[in-house]
Amino acid sequence: MSEKVKREKTHRLKTYLEFVKIEHTLFALPFAYAGAVLAAHGIPSLRLIVLIATAFTGMRTAAMTLNRIIDREIDALNPRTADRHLPSGKMSLKEAYSLLILALLIYFVSAYLINETAFILSPIPVAIAWIYPYLKRYTCLSHFVLGFTLAFAPIGGWVSVTNSFNPFGSEFVPCVMGIAVAFWVAGFDIIYALQDVEFDRSHGLYSAGARFGVKKALIVSCLCHVAFFVLLCYSLWIYGLNWGAIPGLAVIAFLLVYQHLIVTPKKFDEKRVQIAFFKANAAVSSIFFLTSAGVVLFGYW
């Protein structure tokens, strides 16, 4: 293989990874592993660790690809998103659909190999991910629907270990945790959407900022993050974690407060939003995993 061909293949791979924002998998995967560790009361098997990673990477890739395909015409009109891969021509629609099929194949095969319950439940996140991009055209509740696409992360990790789904019984803890994650995602998605307030208003899109104003949208976002933190603490309390979780929860609380301090009605430029959206929230999910794993594995109180 010539160097030119190698460079071209490397460039295409980089393009695909940029297209699906592979780094955003950090939002979901730590919660999935936290659910698995809590359900197993320790470290799951290596096989399960790998399958959880492939399943959630496949699902996250499929969700992002669906969003990009469905929103390609809107993205082309928005100056902030016009340079994205589909509207700019960096990637063809055929390539995007091929990537979607591959991601779904990896996701469903991984779910099948995990266990029967995971496979039976696997179409639900896909259906929600498909519905979400259309809802933003009709209701600002789309922020919360997006949240539910990631709410399945702790539930999926837990079910991967237990092979059962009883939301009012053995799976009550991950379900509460999943609802918490839905509020968390809705909160930071409301902040992220502030970048497009004027565009959304002029094109009839239903982001919270466009419909209710930046100030009210930030209040709703703050309330979502309060709900997230309360439900997260409640889920850990039900599970039985005690003092060992406090340091991690304190850091999570700080990160939540921090992003609401740097993004205000008068200051919501792209740089501040990106810090709040990606850096702070990627840290939240990672710290939660470390907190859960640390207390379960080392049992300090």
Image (cartoon, rainbow, N blue to C red):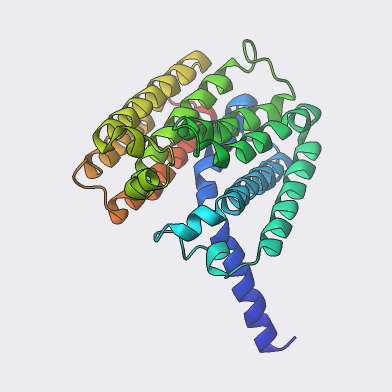
Q: Position of residue 253 (x, y in %)?
A: 32, 31
Residue at the top extreme of this rendering = 168
The residue lying at 71 percent from left, 39 percent from top is: 48
Q: Can residue 122 be seen in this view?
A: no
* Residue 77 place in picture, x, y as percent: 45, 58
Q: Nearer the viewer, residue 265 or 148?
A: 265
Q: Quadrant of the N terminus?
A: bottom right
Kindly tell me whether residue 252 is visible in this rendering: yes
The residue nearer to you, when weighing 161 against 133, is: 133
Relative vertical location of residue 82 with respect to residue 104 in this rendering, above or below? below
**Number of residue marks:** 0
Q: Which residue is drawn at 56% across and 18% down?
A: 173
Instruction: Give the camera-side residue of 149 and 256.
Output: 149
Above or below for 38 versus 201: above
- Report whether 196 appears left or right of 86: left
Res 45 quadrant in image = top right
Q: In x, y percent, where is residue 225?
A: 36, 29
Residue depicted at 65% across the width and 46% down the height: 53
